Amino acid sequence: MLRLITVSALGVALLSGCATTQNIISQVTPAETPLAQVLKQRPDLRKELATVEIRQYFNRVEAPTAAEVKITETGLMDDSVRSIRSIYHFKNINGQWQQGDVQTAYLCARGKNTKTFQSKKCP
């Protein structure tokens, strides 16, 4: 009986410690990573039937100061566009990721340039 009480008390202590740890972690870590911010801006990426490739890059592993989120959408309903690539730029300012500019490029399915991404829309 004493073992059962001891194991129960230990289990309760461990579980309450996990809840406290989660509260501390949520206060220490930055609110939203660059990837989370982009996914919040673009909820269509979760619902589209096209092939979507999402990559997040940081300028260094420890204490990054800059980041990019690159989204490449392929298999679109538009027959003139093969792929759309959007690159979101971020800077870490006082521990918060701030979004900068967004570059959008198109890979055309027809026309003169069908091999590389270009900034102008496809014909």
Image (spheres, grey):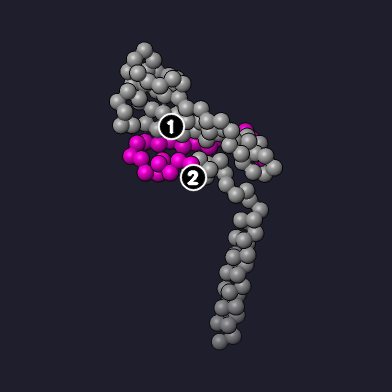
* Quarter of the figure with residue 61: top right
Q: Is residue 59 visible?
A: yes
In the rendering, at what x and y percent does residue 95 appear? 67, 44
- Please name whichever residue, 56 or 89, is drawn nearer the observer in this view of the structure: 89
In the rendering, at what x and y percent does residue 74 appear? 37, 31
**Residue at the image position 40 percent from the left and 33 percent from the top:** 73
Residue 60 in magenta stretch: yes
Q: Quadrant of the C terminus?
A: top left
**Of the residues shown, which amino acid type is indicated by label 1?**
Thr
In the rendering, at what x and y percent does residue 34 appear? 56, 41
Q: Which residues are magenta?
A: 41-64
Furthest-top residue in view? 112
- Please name whichever residue, 41 or 92, is drawn nearer the observer in this view of the structure: 41
* Quarter of the figure with residue 11: bottom right
Q: Which residue is mark 1?
A: 72
- Please name whichever residue, 12 or 123, is drawn nearer the observer in this view of the structure: 123
In the rendering, at what x and y percent does residue 90 appear? 59, 35
SS for callout 2: helix
Q: Which residue is mark 2?
A: 40
Please name which of the two marks, 1 or 2, marks the residue nearer to the observer: 2
Near mark 2 (Cα within 10 A), the count class, few <14, some 14-19 or many ≥20, is few
Q: Quadrant of the N terminus?
A: bottom right
Image disc number at residue 118: none
SS for callout 1: strand
**Residue at the image position 35 percent from the left and 25 percent from the top:** 81
The tag earlier along the polypeptide, 1 or 2, is: 2
